[in-house]
Amino acid sequence: MKIEIFSDFTCPFCYIGKRELERAINLAGYSGKVEIEYKAYQIGPDTPKKDAPTLYEGMVAKFNATLEEVKEMTKGIAVRAEATGLHYNFEDMKTAHTEKAHRLAKWVRQFGKESIYTEELMRGYFTEGKDLNDDMFLLEVIENLGLDVEKAKGVLASNDFSEALDKDRYDAQQLGVQSVPFFVFENRYGIKGAEPNEVFVRTLHQAAEIAGIQPVLRMTGDGEAICADGECKL
């Protein structure tokens, strides 16, 4: 089953949606049967590449609000994140231009490590306050993935994979994607936003019918209350 995810590394609902999808795949019994492709969608293409403001500073300017007001705005997001096992550290978050991070993701994809790369960038941004436009952090992730750091440096220093980002923008326009996260299942079903887990489970089953796959039986329980070979555990 093919799932395409339009997202940005700095989108708080994208990380939540990623978690909801992963849990749904496991609950619905499709682990190992899903191919996920991440599609770049920058939510802040005008963000400064140098000396970018903190997240709170950026929100104060964007919404013409006070610091107290923007902190109140993030409370609901933090609660939703906690419900999926994520702890968002808004105090340390910075705004970030993510074009380099997305180009590097396209390079990483050819090695089958795009998903873990995405996880590391989102975890770094939302929980550790990492700057996603910082080459040192991006290369640290590359090294931890066991990939060639020198080749990654070349990607960051060039415009490599810019055409792939343009292709993602075109695909988003063709599908009418105007916000993220946006999930496309088997090019047939779409989910807009970080919907509740049951929405993902239901859509997975619908897409599985199109893909012609069946869920794997998931075992639960401890197996203690059973009878076998003419004997029962008492």
Image (tube, grey):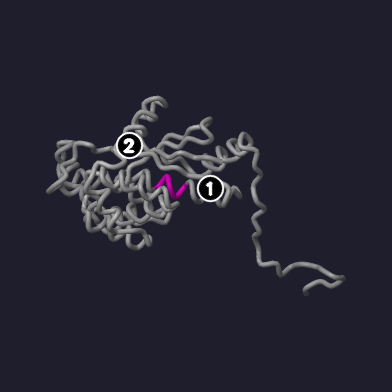
Amino acid type assigned to the residue bearing label 1 in the image: Ala
Amino acid type assigned to the residue bearing label 2 in the image: Leu
Q: Which residue is at the front of the view, 57 or 21?
A: 21
Please indicate whether residue 144 sits to the left or right of residue 60 in the image.
right
Please indicate whether residue 231 sits to the left or right of residue 17 in the image.
right
Among numbered discs 2 and 1, the one appearing first in the sequence: 1
**CA neighbours of label 2 inside 10 A, class few (<14), some (14 to 19), many (20+):** some
* Mark 1 element type: helix
Q: Is residue 83 rendered magenta in the image?
A: no
Q: Is residue 18 rendered magenta in the image?
A: yes
Q: What residue is at 51 percent from the left and 45 percent from the top? A: 35
Front of the two marks 2 and 1? 2
* Image quarter in which the N terminus is found: top right
Tell me where residue 93 appears, x and y as whole percent.
23, 52
Q: Which residue is mark 2?
A: 165
Q: What residue is at 53 percent from the left and 30 percent from the top? A: 188
Q: Which residue is at the front of the view, 173 or 93?
A: 173
**Residues in magenta, as a range:** 16-20
Tell me where residue 131 appears, x and y as whole percent.
22, 53
Q: Residue furthest right?
A: 230
* Numbered label attached to residue 24: 1
**Dominant secondary structure (helix, strand or loop) of the stretch shown in magenta:** helix
Q: Residue furthest bottom?
A: 234
